[in-house]
Image (cartoon, rainbow, N blue to C red):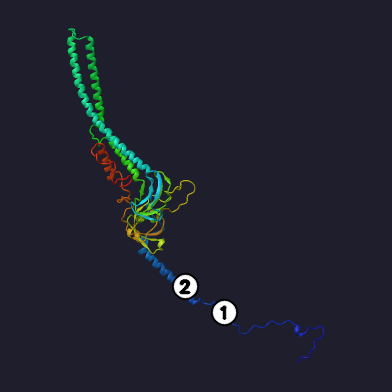
Amino acid sequence: MNDTVAAPGSRAPHDAPAAPPAPAAHAPPPAASAPPNASRRRGLTVLALVVLLCGVAYGSYWFLDGRYYESTDDAYVDGDVVQITSEEPGTVIGLHADDTQFVARDQPLLELDPADAQVAVRRAEANLGHAVRAVRALFAQSDQLQAEIVDREVALQRAERDYQRRTGLLSDGAVSSEELQHTQEDVTEIRATLVAAREQLNGTRDQIDGTTVATNPEVLAAAAAVRDAWLALRRTHVTSPVSGVVARRSVQVGQQVAAGTPLMGVVPLDAVWVNANFKEVQLGDMRVGQPVTLRADVYGGKAIYHGRVVGLSAGTGSAFALLPAQNASGNWIKIVQRLPVRIQLEAAELRAHPLRIGMSVTASVDIRDTSGPLVSRDVRRVPIPSQPSLANDPAVEARITHIIDENLGRAPGISRLSANWEYGKR
């Protein structure tokens, strides 16, 4: 035990500053930087190889197959919307079809009140009978005028002979000058009536020469009026000109419609097509007749359609817009335009998986074969089905013939209407 005592004024040993520690004789050097992780290096290498292989695979696909296809998802189903309109004014008294319903060709769609048309038919038939009788009277008048002319010619010859005899007797005093003057006046009067009869005969013949009663213009005009009245009556029954689905029905029972008013539309879904809007940079190798593969969004891509290019539009969508762009004025920014390409679909595939107008479609065109034309020269060979003409209806023609014969006296035992004839029906 240290018993040493510090002198006054001196510092105790524990208050003295500590001396710095001496460095270790054998301290290890600083640690060197660790080398790259081998596993990480291997992962990057594998990733690079995968990317390289994917690039090679895609490049091979594009070079061997992909570059021969042009695709777009800016494609939509389109088709004809056959407008159903009324050709005659009238009041709707019956509706036989509604929206979303399928209708066959010639199936009744609606009916108009036929009362006015029935009255018009009766009036036209009466006018036809009157025209036949009037023309028949002209033929009879012609014969009568011919007989009158012969009678006046005989009377004129008699009056001229009497005048000549009295002229020879005037010098002998056998006849007076007054009697001779009366004879001369008779000759002048008969000659005037003969000229008038001849002119009247010429006027009558001008109306009937070269015709019969049935082929006379007056009768033909009256017969045309009968046909027109029957057409108006038939048109009170509006039928579908095509088979399809009813859309946009706007008419109601009791509504008064004017001629030409759109009433509803019929869409033939078995004849729809696709309008695919391709960028103008995609059209370099696109030709009419090239095959197309399509997938509709409605079936989730499960249904595959096959078609062909039937034509390219005559202008871009912006060119046919309501307000086309005016690039010649103001600032101009180039925008890649799109051109509608019409694609015809296979009918069997449409029947298996029906499409509706406006549905979205993805289209891919195989542009390998560039031998087709750039502009379609095809003419539509099959017209859109339409209603048959009613102008030469056999029943109406038979009715007209019957009226003519009846008013000529050829069918006295036939009633005005046959037993099974009704206005508006056959």
> Where, by quadrant of the figure, is residue 415 drawn?
top left
Would residue 186 appear left or right of 335 to someone viewing this image?
left
* 174, 348: nearer the viewer: 174
Looking at the picture, tell me which residue is in the foreground, 355 or 31: 355
Q: Is residue 376 above or below residue 351?
A: above
Residue at horizontal 26%, vertical 27%?
203
Query: Outermost residue, bottom direction?
Result: 1
Badge 2 density bin: few <14, some 14–19, many ≥20, Cα 10 Å: few
- Which of discs 1 and 2 lies nearer the camera? The answer is 2
- The image quadrant that residue 395 belongs to is top left
Q: Secondary structure at mark 2?
A: helix
| Percent of width and height locating residue 70 | 38, 59
Q: Amino acid at mark 2?
A: Leu
Q: Position of residue 368 (x, y in %)?
A: 33, 59
Mark number for residue 31? Answer: 1
Relative to 145, residue 36 above or below = below
Kindly identify which residue carries mark 2. 44
Q: Position of residue 294 (x, y in %)?
A: 37, 60
Residue depicted at x 76% and y 85%:
13
Number of numbered discs visible in the structure rendering: 2
Above or below, comparing residue 362 to residue 38 in the picture: above
